[in-house]
Amino acid sequence: MKRFVPILITVTLGIAGCAERIDYDIEEVAPEEHLHGEEEHLHGEEEHHDECCDDVHEETSELEGLHTGVHMHESGVRNHGTEWFFNQPWAASFVWGKMLRDTIVLLFIATALFLIPRIRNRKQK
Amino acid sequence: MSSVMAFALMTMKSLLRRRTIYGIAIVIILALIAIGQIPSFDVSNQGRFILDFGLFGLEIGALVLAIGIAANIYPRDRERRTAMPLLAVPLSRTKYLLGRFTGAALVQSAALVTGSVGLMIVLLLNGLSIPPDLLPATLLLLVEGWFLLAIVFFFSFWTSPPLNAPLTIILFVISQMSVRDFVALMPGVPGVMRFLRMLLPHMDVFHIKDPVVHSVDIPAVYFVLAILYGLAYTAFMLSVALAVFRTRDLK
């Protein structure tokens, strides 16, 4: 148990450094402009498409009352349908600093866990 | 370091003598061939299917390789009592762990690189071009494989091989989950679940399969950060494994 105490202390301190808040869960730490990239214009497009579709619905009785609400977005851009694609670390540069911070903390913990027993052994000798 | 490398080469040769690695490598290659045979059903961009499934197969292959290679190394050494004479004189526990890990990592890397080359061949045979980011994606998969290897070594020092595999798989699965999904597993204790999730690695860092498949450019700085993150987490897991190994009585 005594040997685990410095290990637990080191790990806890290191994790406390990483854990001010949940790191790079993109949806929690993302700025507003990243989360809602193009959604503001969607309502305008839907209304426009509603008008277009009405003519089609009048012509086709089978589709009367049906509303597909299909609309197109520019490819390769974040929108309500591609959130899953852009909610990944490679697309969220605002979490890269946290990745670097965690890398440094993990290396610190690894070094501490490696060196503490060796220092203790030297002192005992 | 020369003793570590010598022991690593010994580990690599002993692993290559086992049939486990060849069985896993054959399964990976057969899976890649099967992925290449998936008909397009007139869907455009068939290459995306092959690339997506191929990279996913390589990631699962890294997990299976880590478990298959490393889960039995230390338990076998302890059962056959080969660990005690090794640790008595020529090797410290640190060098033993580093040597075993390095040898296993070399074998795993060779298998994954072979799988990646096989994926490239499958793409070429289907008349598709090889995306330029496939090699960096493979490198990230290698780092992910090393990290999984370190986890397996950590578990091997205090669990049996039949328990090592499911623990590693569970850790692999929950490390892919977002915080929201992880907390939803036990919504009654959100604080505890969030703290537990903070302890786990963010394995989505290694996932660049989607941008590679859809030909989206990834900044080079991200590759460097992701590799450094993976190596740091691997070093962390190895240091924790070493801390556990130092407390183990080999008798």
Image: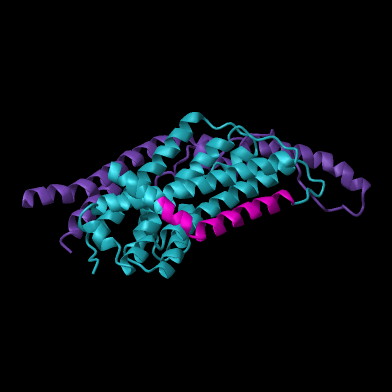
Residue B37 on image: x %, y %: 74, 51
- From what the image shows, is residue B30 above or below residue B131? below
Give how far across and how far down residue B155 sits, in percent. 36, 61
Q: Residue at x 26, y 42 (%)?
A: A108
Magenta-drawn stretch contains B16: yes
Quadrant in which residue B137 is drawn: top right
* Magenta span main SS: helix
Would you say A25 lies left or right of B97 here?
right
Which colour represents chain A? purple
Apparent colour of chain B: cyan
| Residue positioned 48% across, 46% down in the render | B109
Given residues B81 and B155, the one toward you in this image is: B81
A111 magenta-colored: no
**Considering the image in quadrants, where does the N terminus of chain B appear?**
top left
Residue B186 visible to an observer of this rendering: no
Q: Is residue B67 visible?
A: yes
